[in-house]
Image (cartoon, rainbow, N blue to C red):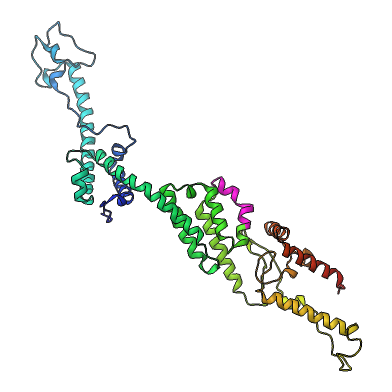
Amino acid sequence: MTDNAVYYNEAKDWEDWQMEFRKRAEGEDVWQYIEPSSDLPWPQEPTPPHIADYQSNTIHANTESNSSGRLGRSQTTGSAVPQGLGDLSDAGRLSFQQHWNEYTVAIRRYETIKKSLRTLREWVLKTVNKSIQKTDLPPNGNLNKWYAILAQSGEEYASHRMEDARIAFKNHLRLAPKKEAGLEKWIVRWKELMAEGQRQGVPETTEPRAWALDFVNAVEETAPLWASNYRLNKLDAVNNREVSYREVATNLLREIANRRNRSAVPRGSYKAGFLTLHGQQADQDDMDQDDRDTQPPEPANPRGKAGSKGSNSGRGGKKTDQKRKRKESDAETESGRRCKACLAPGHSISSCFYVFPEKAPEGFRFNEAAARFVKIQIESDTAIKEEVNRLSKKAKLEPDD
């Protein structure tokens, strides 16, 4: 085995060192003798059978023998002690041969274990600090005793590491980025802290509902639609341990990549005004926002008197209304072309198919999770609700084309 540059110089090295130690002990097939919870006795060298303990063929008539053909020393009084196989009776010879075969297997196994323990012991002496060896490791102690001593100091330090891991994890949640640009790096670090927290037994990382809600709340400002969708559709699976923290992180990373790809589509060829949910993307036809929100311009006044009497009615009144519409449309476009209801980029609330389903083209596939989210948005936000009501009334007043 390679050294892997793992050393035990102080208590903080315990976790990495003990992982390497256990890996080596399992590789040598001796971990079961060292593990603190094991009931197996420490390996002892087996004792070989002695011919003198078996039945002789010249034993005195009043000497007793057991069913195996083996005798106690006190049972051989009055007869010669057997010196070789030839001095044994048939039963004694058969019993001795059976016990010798068992001893041969046992001694070979013992020699293998002894060699493995010697190899592991040499690695310990090579990797543990010399001063720790002098103070903590008794020279004649077995590896199981050495391991228990080192584990005690290492586990005391580990209790402090758990609190450190907990603090680092909680601090990271508070540092969630407000912009999507730094979200990917933040998620990668979150996964690392989750793994460390679970190794240290941090409750906030071992309880699925705790870490899932913390994660969703942390990214909600940057990825509101994804967060709402996860609350509605995935929290039960997380609570049932059907979805791991790695899968949750991967799902959001994939969503970020999808959003980036959609934002790269040139204006005028925009597709799908809603985020991808569970691999299904809501469909919206390619449209230009300004073309949808603005009526075609009216012909110029043939008399060239835009401000003449009657300009507030008829053609003049309609033209004024067009300018107002254009101004509203421009304001919506300048706000970043992000719908206030579904939070998707590329269109305004006035042309969102989830707010005004009647505007959706034939064959448009509505996403149920997206529809639920938009409904929650409208019902919970007074400003959005008022704007939807205003646009609805406006649509009723306008004549159909």
Q: In the picture, residue 38 is in which quadrant?
A: top left
Q: Is residue 354 something that shows in the picture? A: no
Q: What is the x, y in percent for residue 214?
A: 54, 54
Q: What is the x, y in percent for residue 260?
A: 57, 70
Decide: is 216 above or below 96.
Answer: below
Q: What is the x, y in percent for residue 41?
A: 27, 31
| Residue 360 falls left or right of residue 345 | right
Q: Is residue 250 something that shows in the picture? A: yes
Q: What is the x, y in percent for residue 60?
A: 12, 8
- The residue lying furthest to the bottom in this view is 304
Q: Nearer the viewer, residue 277 or 232?
A: 232
Confirm whether the magenta stretch covers residue 17: no
Tally of numbered tags: 0
| Residue 54 falls left or right of residue 319 | left
Decide: is 297 above or below 178.
Answer: below
Confirm whether the magenta stretch covers residue 230: yes
Q: Main SS of the magenta segment?
A: helix
Decide: is 137 above or below 400.
Answer: above
Residue beneath the point at 29% across and 39% down:
34
Q: Nearer the viewer, residue 327 or 62?
A: 327
Quarter of the image containing the C terminus? Answer: bottom right
Numbered range of the magenta stretch: 228-241
- The residue lying furthest to the top in this view is 62
